[in-house]
Image (cartoon, rainbow, N blue to C red):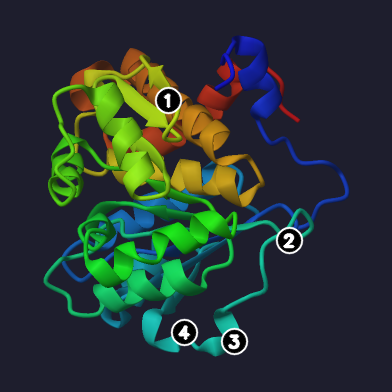
Amino acid sequence: MREYTPEVFAELLPYPTPNLYKYSRGRLILVVGSRAYPGAAGLASLAGQRAGAGYTEVYVEDSIVQRVQIYAPSLVVRAWSEWDSAHWMPRADARHPRAYVLGCGFDATDPYIANVTRQILKRGKAPVLVDGGALKMLPARKIHALCEPREKDNLPTIITPHFGEAVTLAQTYNIPTEDPVELAKELARYYHASCVLKGPNTYISDGEDCYCMTEGTAALSKAGTGDVLAGIIGALLAQGVEPIDACVLGTTLHARAGRLAAEDLTSIAITPEDLISYIPRAVLSLGNGRTS
């Protein structure tokens, strides 16, 4: 794994070139939210926009379409029931980059989420970030069986558990959980994915190496900040940033935004909504003030 210096972070930021348009700049498709947690869909999708995705498309449980649409008029919000075979697009490439974010705000009691998770992993020909309620589906035999073929087909899968979710993922395969570095590595191996193990320090692994992101802050310990992180990383993936680079850059932007927000608003008072508004300042800080 490369050394992530300030110079590397500045180079990784996906500043758009003049010839790009909304689709070539990156299409981010989020399958998120539920009747119980519609806010997660809004947080993840708005963070994806702020992190640079050119076209942000959100699929949610049918009854909350209007509730999610009000977060921003620029969001394209559709009901999952509208999804049909036409939405399974050809494989993403450099001309038409794309990524999926799956699971933020899923309610484990909703019967449709297992099918949604299985379909995205099986037929989504682009990077897929699995978060929240969708992580609970991964140990299921039929869903786990989809991870290895994705890896063999060079289709990246990214999992973003916090420690409690990581323990659940680990129990199925009797993976020890005491050492976070080894836990991140083993989860990456067993789920054929890049793993972002979230916590005060965040551990990012491709199964072989592990990077520790140490800029985290207690200001981020509020419900909803993980949805913001998923949107940020998803947007970077949608813009063609390589999976581990997207995970390291995304977690660093997220942490930096939290620190910058806390400087203005205090670590007590910041909310996930505030965090989204500080993504631009985090970009400026990592890009040495560059704006385009």
- Please identify the quarter of the rendering in which residue 63 is found: bottom left
- Please identify the quarter of the rendering in which residue 261 is found: top left
- Please identify the quarter of the rendering in which residue 90 is found: bottom right
Q: Which residue position is annotated with label 2? A: 96
Q: Is residue 76 shown left or right of residue 251?
A: right
Residue 83: which numbered mark, if any?
Answer: 4
| Structural crowding at the residue carrying mark 2, measured as other residues with C-alpha within 10 Å and reported as few (<14), some (14–19) or many (≥20) | some
Where is residue 231 drawn, in percent x and y?
44, 47
User: Of label 3 and label 1, which has the lower sequence position?
Assistant: 3
- How many numbered marks does the figure carry? 4
Name the residue rendered at 15%, 31% in the picture.
177
Where is residue 118 drawn, in percent x and y?
35, 72
Name the residue rendered at 15%, 66% in the picture.
108
| Residue 127 in view | no
User: Of label 2 and label 3, which has the lower sequence position?
Assistant: 3
Label 3 – label 4 distance at C-alpha: 8 Å
| Structural crowding at the residue carrying mark 3, measured as other residues with C-alpha within 10 Å and reported as few (<14), some (14–19) or many (≥20) | few
- The amino acid type found where label 2 is placed reads His
Q: Which residue position is annotated with label 3? A: 86
| Structural crowding at the residue carrying mark 4, measured as other residues with C-alpha within 10 Å and reported as few (<14), some (14–19) or many (≥20) | few
